[in-house]
Image (cartoon, rainbow, N blue to C red):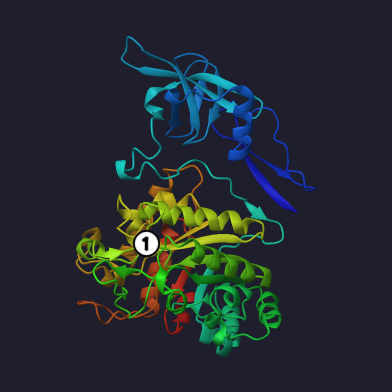
């Protein structure tokens, strides 16, 4: 039985929340005065009440209160959440210079109407982020607050590779018993494209992915995790997939001159993120992971390769859809979320740590608000070693674990305030020593604890720890 949360139009300064429990296959029916985030229901309502005048459509840039007159002292008529589409019917400027707009908002089978300060309206969603990204979708997205049979937890996780899943799982369970760790991020499809279990999806799309199938008895494997109260997160490497492009060479990213395949600095091949067949494959594996009992699906490498602009311009990404990179990444996550919702599993996306601190998509298609709006959890990879010298005013961010995590998380929290339905922030943090960084420091328990403290100081109580060799400083976790 699934709990559904609806935003309510409340005659107060705060938006109330009411929870309905669906006891049958019929959707819970909202009562008088509710704002519904479901696009289907909104479209049906507008068909009955008359479409908005396209020239008069505006979008709220914050949660706004509608007043009966052009004064905040007048009677409140209701409120509408940020980035809702409304119809502008009148505008006036008062003698004191204040500008007010009269708007209409459709709610199921009727509408509310009232005055709002003109400054709370936008002609295009996202225009206050950056003009290049106004085409992305920032409208409120319906998300399930909590699945009854899959309750959310404050995840404190470690990364578990394919090899560790079969050889170290018992040791990691003991680690969890002795520390605050309660979650494992387990490779289900790794950086090369190999899968954790024998997958029907891999058999259909990329049989070589099954060639190592590390876990033979998934029922027993998952039972062991559940019996020990481990929240299981399935890591799926999304667009970097050497096995997939070996099977479908026509789908690989290539150089425009000579069509030579592009290979990243780690000697790995990438398929085009525009490839809808790969979308289908990745999501099909995610569905199998959910069926096996994973609580959450985490898409990693859900981006374009990180390249200098000059090199990026040399590549053919096979963009038959003529989409921007940010649009493609958001569209994939929207597709994945819609497909996985029926499985009652949460969806997460890994992104570059600095995405929350820049105005654009960093040239890889990861725009903070666009990603955060589509998923349940957003996971910025805030490894201090991955920030350039001088970022946040730090000479070598790797040498300042607390300060780097604090500033990056602070920026991310502020960016989430730009949208009505943001994802919960659960960062990746560093438990490895980056010897390749000039001015690096050794990362041990002290450095790991400093990063966790930075998150705690900002009210973020979830994290995931990355060490590629799965060796962790447990003293920091007790």
Looking at the image, how many numbered discs can be counted on the residues? 1
Locate residue 379, reporting x and y percent. 45, 62
- Pick the quarter of the image with the N terminus: bottom right
Q: Residue pushed farthest right?
A: 24
Which residue is drawn at the image coordinates 67% and 72% (left, top)? 292
Location of residue 351 with respect to 321 vertically, above or below: below
Tell me: 458 left or right of 8: left
Identify which residue is drawn at 50% across, 56% down: 333
Q: Position of residue 235 (x, y in %)?
A: 52, 71
**Residue 441 visible in the snapshot:** yes
Q: Residue furthest front?
A: 258
In the displayed structure, 114 sits above or below 321; it is: above
Dividing the picture into quadrants, the one containing residue 302 is bottom left
> Which residue is more in the foreground, 269 or 422?
269
Judging by the rendered image, the residue that carries numbered circle 1 is: 318
Q: Residue furthest top?
A: 95
Residue drawn at x 45%, y 32% is 60
Of residue 453 and residue 281, the one placed in the foreground of this image is 281
Q: Dot 1: what SS? A: loop
């Amino acid at each position: 039985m699934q709990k559904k949360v609806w935003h309510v139009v409340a005659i107060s300064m705060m938006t109330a929340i009411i929870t309905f429990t669906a006891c049958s296959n019929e959707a819970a029916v909202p009562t008088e005065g509710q704002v519904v985030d479901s696009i289907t229901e909104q479209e049906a309502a507008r068909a009955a009440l008359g479409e908005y005048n396209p020239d008069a459509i505006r979008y709220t840039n914050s949660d706004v209160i509608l007043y009966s007159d052009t004064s905040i002292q007048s009677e409140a008529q209701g409120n509408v959440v940020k980035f809702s589409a409304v119809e502008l019917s009148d505008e006036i400027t008062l003698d004191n210079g204040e500008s007010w707009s009269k708007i209409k908002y459709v709610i199921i089978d009727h509408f509310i109407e009232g005055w709002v300060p003109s400054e709370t309206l936008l002609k295009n969603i996202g225009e206050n982020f950056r003009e290049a990204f106004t085409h992305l979708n920032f409208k409120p997205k319906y998300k399930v607050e909590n699945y009854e049979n899959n309750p959310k937890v404050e995840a404190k996780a470690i990364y578990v590779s394919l090899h560790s899943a079969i050889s170290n799982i018992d040791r990691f369970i003991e680690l969890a018993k002795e520390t605050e760790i309660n979650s494992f991020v387990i490779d289900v499809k790794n950086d090369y494209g190999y899968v954790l279990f024998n997958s029907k999806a891999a058999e259909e799309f990329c049989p070589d992915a099954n060639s190592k199938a590390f876990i033979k008895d998934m029922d027993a494997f998952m039972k062991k995790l559940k019996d020990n109260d481990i929240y299981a997160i399935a890591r799926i490497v999304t667009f970097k997939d050497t096995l997939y492009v070996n099977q479908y060479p026509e789908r690989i990213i290539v150089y425009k001159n000579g069509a030579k395949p592009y290979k990243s600095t780690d000697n790995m091949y990438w398929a085009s993120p525009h490839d809808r067949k790969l979308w289908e494959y990745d999501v099909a594996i995610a569905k199998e992971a959910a069926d096996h009992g994973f609580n959450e699906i985490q898409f990693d490498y859900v981006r374009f390769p990180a390249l200098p602009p000059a090199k990026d311009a040399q590549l053919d990404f096979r963009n038959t859809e003529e989409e921007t990179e940010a649009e493609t990444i958001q569209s994939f996550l929207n597709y994945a979320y819609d497909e996985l919702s029926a499985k009652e599993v949460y969806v997460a996306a890994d992104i570059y740590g600095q995405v929350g601190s820049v105005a654009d998509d960093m040239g890889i298609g990861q725009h903070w608000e666009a990603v955060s709006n589509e998923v349940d959890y957003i996971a910025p990879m805030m490894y201090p070693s991955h920030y350039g010298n001088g970022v946040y005013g730090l000479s070598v961010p790797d040498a300042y674990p607390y300060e780097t995590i604090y500033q990056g998380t602070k920026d991310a929290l502020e960016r989430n305030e730009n949208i009505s339905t943001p994802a919960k922030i659960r960062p990746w943090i560093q438990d490895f020593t980056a010897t390749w960084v000039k001015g690096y420091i050794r990362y041990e328990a002290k450095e790991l604890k400093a990063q966790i403290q930075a998150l705690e100081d900002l009210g973020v109580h979830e994290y995931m720890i990355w060490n590629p060799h799965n060796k962790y400083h447990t003293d920091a976790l007790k």
